[in-house]
Amino acid sequence: MAKKETKMPLPKIYLDDDLFSTQEQRDDKLKEKVVNISLNDIDDFPKHPFKVIDNEDMKQMVESISENGVLVPTLVRPKENGKYEMISGHRRKFASELAGLETIPCIVRELTDDEATIIMVDSNLQREKILPSEKAFAYKLKMEALSHQGRRSDATLYPLNTKLDSASFIGKDNQDSRATVFRYIRLTELIPQILQMVDNDALKLSPSMAFRPAVEISYLKEEEQKELLDIMECFVCTPSLSQAQDFKRLSKDNKLTREYMETILEQEKPNQIQTLKVNMDKLNNILPTNLTTNEERENYVVKAVSFYGRWLQKKREQEKNER
């Protein structure tokens, strides 16, 4: 009897998709995709130096996102815990939250800490309005990232070796000189209250301190800065550049005292004489027509305000006695 022939099963063949795909398909796999990610799964960048403020600009962004959605995707990088870290798009994320969205379009990119820092700084420095404090900490972060890369033998992003090289590179990108970059970084040594005064100067708010004197003040010890802040608040003034340089020199020699700071700041400076600007259109309708010079108008306004102040004080006293 003939033995029945048993057919052996054919072996399974696993094909490499890339082997039989076109170059266009392989290139497409490497392209970054835009994906929608839950806002709850995106953490802010650590030590993010740029302020996200709920101001008029933010309200306009919220309105735009409510009507049209987020038109420009944010950039994030994956974290080990399964969540993501925002690199570029903190304001869009905040506006999306205010608009009531649950997700935001993102580009997900694998980045090292230094690469992420540099991209985060560069993308935010493109904004039109940058406060001195924001630029100061941004420059500091980028300087540190570039310094890390300069110490690594595998550094390929920016092959810079010294702080001078890095400062020149940062300044060239942002139209600041190397010296200006270092001055901005010095602002990070200021106590928060004085740093806020530097921001106020840019915003035309009070109390304020000019940029260059603030740089010199940054060399003072923390306790000396606190002492100076107290004196400035008492005298309602700030040091000039030359005075700030004197403070820096004396601090370096451990000779800076409160008495010296008070003596110097008591000296009146032209830039410390406060002026009040009033729209003349508002005054022309109430000032007498016979006042022809600015001095006459100024004297009239001063007398009117003084008279009103005495009348207001008298009225308050009467109300207090009637209670």
Image (spheres, rainbow, N blue to C red):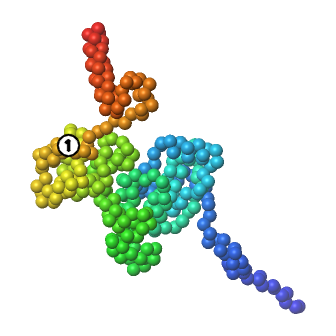
Q: Quadrant of residue 144?
A: bottom left
Q: Quadrant of residue 319?
A: top left
Q: Is residue 249 visible?
A: yes
Judging by the rendered image, the residue that carries numbered circle 1 is 268
Q: Check the image and report above or below for 58 versus 312.
A: below
Label 1 Cα crowd, 10 Å radius (few <14 / some 14-19 / many 20+):
few
Residue at figure coordinates x 64%, y 48% from the top left: 68
Q: Amino acid at mark 1?
A: Glu
Q: Estimate the x, y position of residue 69 in percent, counting from the top left.
A: 62, 49
Closer-to-camera residue (295/315): 295
Element type at mark 1: loop
Q: Position of residue 142 (x, y in %)?
A: 39, 65
Residue appearing at x 34%, y 35% in the figure: 276
Left/right placement of residue 305 relative to residue 268 reads right
In the depicted view, which residue is nearer to us: 126 or 26? Answer: 126
Residue 130 vs residue 175, the one in the foreground: 175
Q: Please tell me which residue lies in front, 195 or 103.
A: 195
